Amino acid sequence: MTPEEFRRYGHAVVDWIAEYQQNVERYPVLSQVAPGDIRAALPPEPPEQGEPFEAVLRDVDSIIMPGITHWQHPSFFAYFPGNSSGPAMLGDLLASGLGVQGMLWSTSPAATELETHVLDWLAQLLDLPDRFRSGTAGGGVIQHSASDAVLCALLAALHRVSGGRTERDGVAAGGYTVYTSGQSHSSIEKACRIAGLGADALRKIDVDPTTHAARPEHLRELVAADVAAGLTPTLVVASVGATGTGAIDPVGALADLAHDAGAWIHVDAAWAGVAAVAPEFRWINAGVGSVDSYATNPHKWLLTNFDCDTFWVADRAALVGALSILPEYLRNAASDSGAVIDYRDWQVPLGRRFRALKLWAVLRWYGAEGLRDHIRGHVALAQEFASWVAADERFELVAPHPLALVTFRLTAGNEATLELMNRVNASGALFLTHTVLDGATVLRLAIGAVSTRHEHVAAAWQALRAAAG
Ligand code: PLP
């Protein structure tokens, strides 16, 4: 593709996306295809001759679009949001256009330095502790996902608690243990598996029956029992905005216990953390002043399309100690000087995209003011939705809902609740998901799409009420 052809088709693609943004409401939120439908429409053989790009765009319309679940639809209320925005897409396009691989500072100094700078900016915007800023022993890095962040936190924790022995000897003999609440995300168990600890190394901290937040007293008991058994408490993961209910753990109390036990404490604030752009929501981060690491996903609720997880550590030496291997072919004068950051040492893969460009574009386009409005608007809509649920005796609220996730159910029971969800989702008019809490089926309505307005939330409530019978 020549630059001229790229210009022509690039304009066509940008027009296509703008059109999609304008018309996204016309689609059913949840894709209506059956398993195998999309593949059945694709030719079995790859093309022998190159095809014009128009043919690709035509097939996007006819084959791909029916198989899309529309995350940017204003009535997408499932999981947690996966925001996308114009500036983020354009920043991503620039990154693709530059095509740099920023594994080392020297492979594109701007990719590293912009990332360091933008992570400092975001830490400032979220009012995170100074110890996460790049001018200290700590600093920030963009990870692919919150799952990568917790894996990196675990590897750094193992490095620290073993004095670096785990990189040499493995983890088999260490008796390393990890703690998090039963409400925390499954990525923590996955990290235990990947790191070689096994899922049995993970202890689930009991939660408070009302707030669904981890109970520090139970963590204390779990740690004491493990220490008595000769095991090594290694990592505690606190959730700020747990996936099922949005529960917020008492981070300070968990951090104190973790530190007393010599363990690393990581905060998984994948969804909720970005709410701290608005000062009135900064209470969610109470206690993070003494944690070892913190992760939140601008790719969930801060207008930055996937992938962009922001991960900060207070002690970069432990992270780099866990992940750095220096083969001769990567040696260069800048790295040898010790004066630069090589982000390959802060993550699992070697290669990395220039993701800072899209986050930079978002922060500059919206400004702190625009980001605060974005978060506040969704929280206000969720509060209104919760008030409607509370006023209808057929429904009940299930957990505290200080942000933009509302959990609720039909008082008629599990089966009725699940049926209700299936009915409204099948209509294509909206999409929400469920979880199970203490044996009860619970619906989750997460507000966060950029295009969601009052009318969409009101329509969702009308649909739920009508389907509830
Ligand atoms: N942690 C929490 C609290 C989450 O809600 C999620 C995903 O929803 C994750 C971690 C995993 O996120 P990612 O897809 O970035 O790995």
Image (spheres, rainbow, N blue to C red):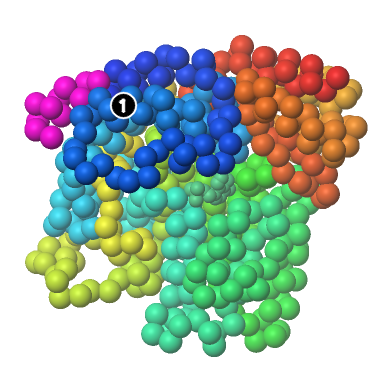
Q: Is residue 335 magenta?
A: no
The residue that appears at 20% across and 75% down in the rendered structure is 327
The residue that appears at 72% across and 18% down in the rendered structure is 463
> Based on the displayed image, in which of its 4 quarters is residue 187 positioned?
bottom right
- Of the 4 image quadrants, the one containing the C terminus is top right
Horizontal and vertical percent for residue 452? 54, 20
Q: Which residue is mark 1?
A: 57
> Based on the displayed image, in which of its 4 quarters is residue 262 positioned?
bottom right
Q: Is residue 113 visible?
A: no
> Main SS type for the magenta part?
helix
Q: Is residue 353 visible?
A: yes
Q: Nearer the viewer, residue 63 or 128?
A: 63
Q: Is residue 6 magenta?
A: yes
- Report whether 163 appears left or right of 111: right
Horizontal and vertical percent for residue 415? 85, 38
Horizontal and vertical percent for residue 357? 27, 38
- Report whether 330 appears left or right of 297: left
The residues colored magenta run 1-12
The three-letter amino acid code for the residue at tag 1 is Leu
Q: Is mark 1 within 8 Å of ligand 1?
A: no
- Report whether 222 appears left or right of 439: left
Q: Is residue 139 above or below residue 110?
A: below
